[in-house]
């Protein structure tokens, strides 16, 4: 994995076998660690190399685990790493941008869907992959995808074992925009800077409210919003925002 910085934005690029065997005992802990080490910065761009953003599991390792009769242990170990990571991404104030240079499948699809926004080059693809392996979905994909594209499109995606091109995924709502391959990273960084320029409370609370809104009735959600905006009223960012508005200038939340 390659890690570079661009004015508050961390770019994490999966390279080599970390793109084709991401969800293995060898690579998944490294992916988790490099993401967690950088959570707390304003924004993180995740991308891959060549034909793959993240192709998911190491199939050879699956075969070995079946032969060794420890496939359940392997699956439990890998989901025990991936699922807490996805939850951290969804609840952190850090803005996550998935720059899909190639295919995302299986757990790699979950990693892309857990980001706050997804952009892709024309080579970007989204694949279900689980059904063909005799597996049920994981990586939060059956929770995240329906919230982007709807339940029935998701049902067809999984049960027909579909592969969506970047254009199809964008049309369906799973990807936000498609850009030329040579513009992918620069556009991802541009979005990351724009989305992450707000105060820490604003970003974290907004992500949290959007995360839980489907589980709350309206009255409960209004109470939740009130609690969080009251907390926002005590922050230095609130004071800066008010002053900037009155002074007719852009707020500085750095």
Image (cartoon, rainbow, N blue to C red):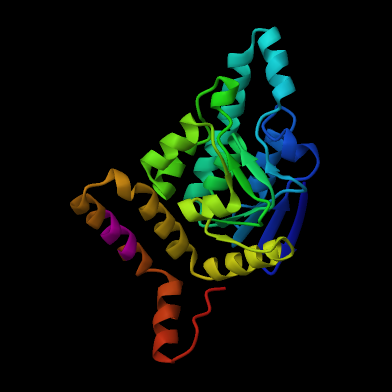
Q: Main secondary structure of the magenta part?
A: helix
Image-based side of 143 in relation to 186, left or right: left
Residue 58 appears in the rendering: yes
Vertical arrangement, residue 36 with respect to residue 17, above or below: below
Q: Quick check: 174 above or below 80?
A: below
Task: Spot the residue most to the right.
Answer: 16
Residue nearest the viewer, comparing 98 with 44: 98
The x and y percentages for residue 187 are: 64, 67
Disc count in the image? 0
Q: Can residue 41 be seen? A: no
Image position of 6 (left or right of 153): right
User: Looking at the image, which is closer to me, 99 or 174?
Assistant: 174
Residue 81: x %, y % from top left: 60, 32
Q: Which of the 4 quarters of the picture holds residue 201?
A: bottom left
Q: Which of the pair 186/236 is nearer the observer?
A: 186
Q: Quadrant of residue 23?
A: top right
Residue 79 locus on image (x, y percent)? 57, 28
- Which residue is outermost to the left? 219
Question: Would you say 94 lies left or right of 152 here?
Answer: right
Would you place residue 240 above or below residue 146 in this image? below
Residue at image position (39%, 49%) is 211
**Residue stretch in magenta:** 224-229
76 in the magenta segment: no
Quadrant where the image shows the C terminus: bottom right
Q: Residue at x 59, y 35 (%)?
A: 107
Rendered location of residue 232, percent (x, y): 37, 66
């Amino acid at each position: 994995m390659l890690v570079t910085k661009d004015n508050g934005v961390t770019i994490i690029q999966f390279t080599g076998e970390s793109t084709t065997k991401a969800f293995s005992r060898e690579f998944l802990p490294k992916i988790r660690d490099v993401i967690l080490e950088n959570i707390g910065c304003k924004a993180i761009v995740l991308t891959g190399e060549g034909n793959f953003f993240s192709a998911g599991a190491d199939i050879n390792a699956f075969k070995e685990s079946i032969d060794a009769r420890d496939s359940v242990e392997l699956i439990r170990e890998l989901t025990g790493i991936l699922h807490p990571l996805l939850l951290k991404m969804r609840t952190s104030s850090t803005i996550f941008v998935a720059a899909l240079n190639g295919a995302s499948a299986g757990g790699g699809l979950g990693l892309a869907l857990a980001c706050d926004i997804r952009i892709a080059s024309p080579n970007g693809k989204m694949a279900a992959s689980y059904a063909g392996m005799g597996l049920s979905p994981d990586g939060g994909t059956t929770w995240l995808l329906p919230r982007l594209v709807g339940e029935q499109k998701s049902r067809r995606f999984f049960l027909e074992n579909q592969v969506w091109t970047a254009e199809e995924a964008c049309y369906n709502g799973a990807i936000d925009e498609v850009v030329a391959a040579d513009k992918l990273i620069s556009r991802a960084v541009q979005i990351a800077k724009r989305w992450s320029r707000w105060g820490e409370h604003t970003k974290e609370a907004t992500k949290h409210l959007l995360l839980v809104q489907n589980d709350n009735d309206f009255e409960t959600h209004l109470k939740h919003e009130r609690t969080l905006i009251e907390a926002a009223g005590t922050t230095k960012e609130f004071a800066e925002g008010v002053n900037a508005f009155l002074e007719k200038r852009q707020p500085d939340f750095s």
